[in-house]
Image (cartoon, helix red, strand yellow):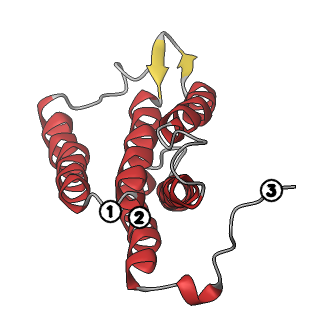
Amino acid sequence: MELNDPTFLSGIDADLLLRLALPAGIGVLLGLDRELRGHAAGLRTHGIICFASAGMTVTAIALFYSLGGTRMDPLRVFEAAGAFLGIIGAGLVVFSGGEIKNVTTAVHLWLTALIGIACGAALWPVVAIMSGIALLLLVVVGIVENRAFPRTEANTK
Protein backbone atom coordinates (compact mmCIF):
# COMPACT_ATOMS: atom_id res chain seq x y z
CA MET A 1 0.00 0.00 0.00
CA GLU A 2 1.33 3.40 -0.95
CA LEU A 3 0.86 6.15 1.64
CA ASN A 4 1.96 9.74 1.89
CA ASP A 5 5.01 10.52 3.99
CA PRO A 6 4.09 11.13 7.63
CA THR A 7 4.17 14.58 9.16
CA PHE A 8 5.58 14.33 12.66
CA LEU A 9 4.62 16.40 15.69
CA SER A 10 7.69 18.51 15.06
CA GLY A 11 5.64 19.94 12.18
CA ILE A 12 3.57 21.94 14.66
CA ASP A 13 4.62 25.55 14.27
CA ALA A 14 3.19 29.03 14.70
CA ASP A 15 1.70 29.07 11.19
CA LEU A 16 -0.21 25.82 11.74
CA LEU A 17 -1.39 26.91 15.19
CA LEU A 18 -2.62 30.20 13.76
CA ARG A 19 -4.42 28.46 10.89
CA LEU A 20 -6.30 26.23 13.35
CA ALA A 21 -6.64 28.23 16.58
CA LEU A 22 -7.75 31.53 15.04
CA PRO A 23 -10.77 30.04 13.26
CA ALA A 24 -11.91 28.39 16.48
CA GLY A 25 -11.85 31.83 18.16
CA ILE A 26 -13.51 33.59 15.23
CA GLY A 27 -16.21 30.92 15.10
CA VAL A 28 -16.96 31.35 18.80
CA LEU A 29 -17.10 35.13 18.32
CA LEU A 30 -19.47 34.77 15.37
CA GLY A 31 -21.63 32.37 17.37
CA LEU A 32 -21.91 34.84 20.23
CA ASP A 33 -24.63 36.82 18.44
CA ARG A 34 -26.66 33.68 17.78
CA GLU A 35 -26.17 32.52 21.39
CA LEU A 36 -27.24 35.86 22.86
CA ARG A 37 -30.37 35.85 20.70
CA GLY A 38 -31.23 32.30 21.73
CA HIS A 39 -30.94 30.75 18.27
CA ALA A 40 -30.33 27.07 17.59
CA ALA A 41 -26.63 27.26 16.66
CA GLY A 42 -24.48 29.21 19.10
CA LEU A 43 -20.93 29.44 20.39
CA ARG A 44 -19.86 25.81 20.20
CA THR A 45 -21.52 25.07 16.87
CA HIS A 46 -19.95 28.07 15.15
CA GLY A 47 -16.56 27.46 16.76
CA ILE A 48 -16.52 23.82 15.73
CA ILE A 49 -17.65 24.51 12.17
CA CYS A 50 -15.04 27.23 11.65
CA PHE A 51 -12.30 25.09 13.22
CA ALA A 52 -13.32 21.95 11.31
CA SER A 53 -13.40 23.84 8.00
CA ALA A 54 -9.91 25.18 8.67
CA GLY A 55 -8.70 21.70 9.60
CA MET A 56 -10.23 20.26 6.45
CA THR A 57 -8.52 22.93 4.34
CA VAL A 58 -5.11 22.54 6.00
CA THR A 59 -5.34 18.77 5.55
CA ALA A 60 -6.36 19.04 1.89
CA ILE A 61 -3.53 21.47 1.11
CA ALA A 62 -0.98 19.37 3.00
CA LEU A 63 -2.08 16.17 1.24
CA PHE A 64 -2.02 17.92 -2.12
CA TYR A 65 1.62 18.91 -1.64
CA SER A 66 2.70 15.67 0.01
CA LEU A 67 1.29 13.70 -2.93
CA GLY A 68 3.10 15.86 -5.46
CA GLY A 69 0.11 17.97 -6.44
CA THR A 70 -1.21 15.42 -8.92
CA ARG A 71 -3.56 13.02 -7.16
CA MET A 72 -6.18 15.28 -5.69
CA ASP A 73 -7.99 18.58 -5.98
CA PRO A 74 -7.88 20.61 -2.75
CA LEU A 75 -10.87 22.65 -3.92
CA ARG A 76 -13.08 19.67 -3.11
CA VAL A 77 -13.03 21.06 0.43
CA PHE A 78 -15.72 23.47 -0.75
CA GLU A 79 -17.83 20.59 -2.03
CA ALA A 80 -17.54 18.69 1.23
CA ALA A 81 -18.28 21.76 3.36
CA GLY A 82 -21.23 22.67 1.15
CA ALA A 83 -22.73 19.19 1.32
CA PHE A 84 -22.32 18.97 5.07
CA LEU A 85 -23.70 22.42 5.79
CA GLY A 86 -26.57 21.86 3.38
CA ILE A 87 -27.68 18.98 5.59
CA ILE A 88 -27.20 20.99 8.79
CA GLY A 89 -28.90 24.06 7.33
CA ALA A 90 -31.87 22.03 6.10
CA GLY A 91 -32.28 20.64 9.60
CA LEU A 92 -32.21 24.10 11.12
CA VAL A 93 -34.72 25.80 8.83
CA VAL A 94 -38.30 25.26 9.92
CA PHE A 95 -41.66 26.46 8.67
CA SER A 96 -43.88 27.29 11.61
CA GLY A 97 -46.99 29.41 11.90
CA GLY A 98 -46.68 30.72 8.36
CA GLU A 99 -43.05 31.85 8.89
CA ILE A 100 -39.73 30.41 7.88
CA LYS A 101 -37.33 30.42 10.85
CA ASN A 102 -33.57 29.97 11.36
CA VAL A 103 -32.57 30.91 7.80
CA THR A 104 -30.09 33.51 9.11
CA THR A 105 -28.57 30.93 11.44
CA ALA A 106 -28.22 28.38 8.62
CA VAL A 107 -26.62 30.92 6.29
CA HIS A 108 -24.41 32.14 9.10
CA LEU A 109 -23.06 28.62 9.58
CA TRP A 110 -22.12 28.55 5.88
CA LEU A 111 -20.32 31.88 6.26
CA THR A 112 -18.52 30.53 9.32
CA ALA A 113 -17.34 27.54 7.30
CA LEU A 114 -16.02 29.81 4.54
CA ILE A 115 -14.09 31.85 7.08
CA GLY A 116 -12.64 28.60 8.43
CA ILE A 117 -11.60 27.55 4.92
CA ALA A 118 -9.92 30.93 4.40
CA CYS A 119 -8.10 30.53 7.75
CA GLY A 120 -6.91 27.07 6.75
CA ALA A 121 -5.55 28.49 3.51
CA ALA A 122 -3.93 31.41 5.43
CA LEU A 123 -5.79 34.00 3.36
CA TRP A 124 -5.61 36.52 6.19
CA PRO A 125 -6.98 39.57 4.31
CA VAL A 126 -10.02 37.49 3.28
CA VAL A 127 -10.44 36.28 6.88
CA ALA A 128 -10.27 39.83 8.24
CA ILE A 129 -12.73 41.26 5.72
CA MET A 130 -15.19 38.37 5.97
CA SER A 131 -15.10 38.33 9.77
CA GLY A 132 -15.52 42.10 10.03
CA ILE A 133 -18.39 42.28 7.58
CA ALA A 134 -20.05 39.21 9.15
CA LEU A 135 -19.97 40.86 12.57
CA LEU A 136 -21.35 44.10 11.11
CA LEU A 137 -24.16 42.24 9.36
CA LEU A 138 -25.09 40.23 12.42
CA VAL A 139 -24.70 42.79 15.16
CA VAL A 140 -25.13 46.26 13.64
CA VAL A 141 -27.70 45.35 11.00
CA GLY A 142 -29.47 43.18 13.61
CA ILE A 143 -29.79 46.17 15.94
CA VAL A 144 -31.01 48.42 13.11
CA GLU A 145 -33.46 45.73 11.99
CA ASN A 146 -34.88 45.33 15.51
CA ARG A 147 -35.35 49.08 15.90
CA ALA A 148 -36.76 49.69 12.43
CA PHE A 149 -38.97 46.60 12.41
CA PRO A 150 -39.78 45.79 16.02
CA ARG A 151 -41.35 42.39 16.58
CA THR A 152 -44.68 42.50 18.31
CA GLU A 153 -46.80 39.64 19.63
CA ALA A 154 -49.16 40.11 16.67
CA ASN A 155 -46.48 39.66 13.98
CA THR A 156 -44.69 36.74 15.62
CA LYS A 157 -47.68 34.41 15.48
Q: Please, what is the three-letter code of the amino acid marked with disc 1?
A: Ala
Name the mark on residue 133.
none
Residue 153: image quadrant is top left
- Left or right, 54 with reference to 3: left
Instruction: Please report the residue visible at 63 percent of the width from the left and 76 percent of the height from the top.
Output: 7
Q: What percent of the width, then of the height, locates residue 97?
A: 52, 14
Helix, strand or loop for disc 2: helix
Which residue has dot 3 on it? 2
Name the residue beneath numbered marker 2.
23
Q: Are dots 2 and 1 in contact, CB under 8 Å? A: no
For disc 3, the neighbor class at 10 Å (few under 14, some 14 to 19, many from 20) is: few
User: Do the residues bearing badges 3 and 2 touch, measured as CB atoms within 8 Å?
Assistant: no
Figure check: 95 above or below 119:
above
Residue 86 position (above or below residue 108): above
- Pinpoint residue 21: horizontal percent, then vertical percent: 45, 74
Image position, residue 150 (x, y; %): 21, 32
Q: Nearer the viewer, residue 84 or 140?
A: 84
- Between the C-alphas of marks 2 and 1, the distance is 10 Å
On the rendered structure, is 105 left or right of 60? Answer: left
Question: In 3D space, how far apart are the residues under numbered discs 3 and 1 (Cα atoms)?
Answer: 29 Å
* Upstream in sequence: badge 2 or badge 1: 2
**Residue 36 in view here:** no
Crowding near the residue tagged with mark 1, few <14, some 14–19, many ≥20 C-alpha atoms within 10 Å: some
Quadrant position of the N terminus in the picture:
bottom right
Classify 124 as above or below 82: below
User: In front here: 37 or 29?
Assistant: 29
The mark nearer the N terminus, 3 or 1, is 3
Q: Which label lies toward us, 3 or 2?
A: 3
> What type is the residue that disc 2 sits on?
Pro
Q: Image quarter for residue 16?
A: bottom left
Query: Which residue is tagged 1?
Result: 122
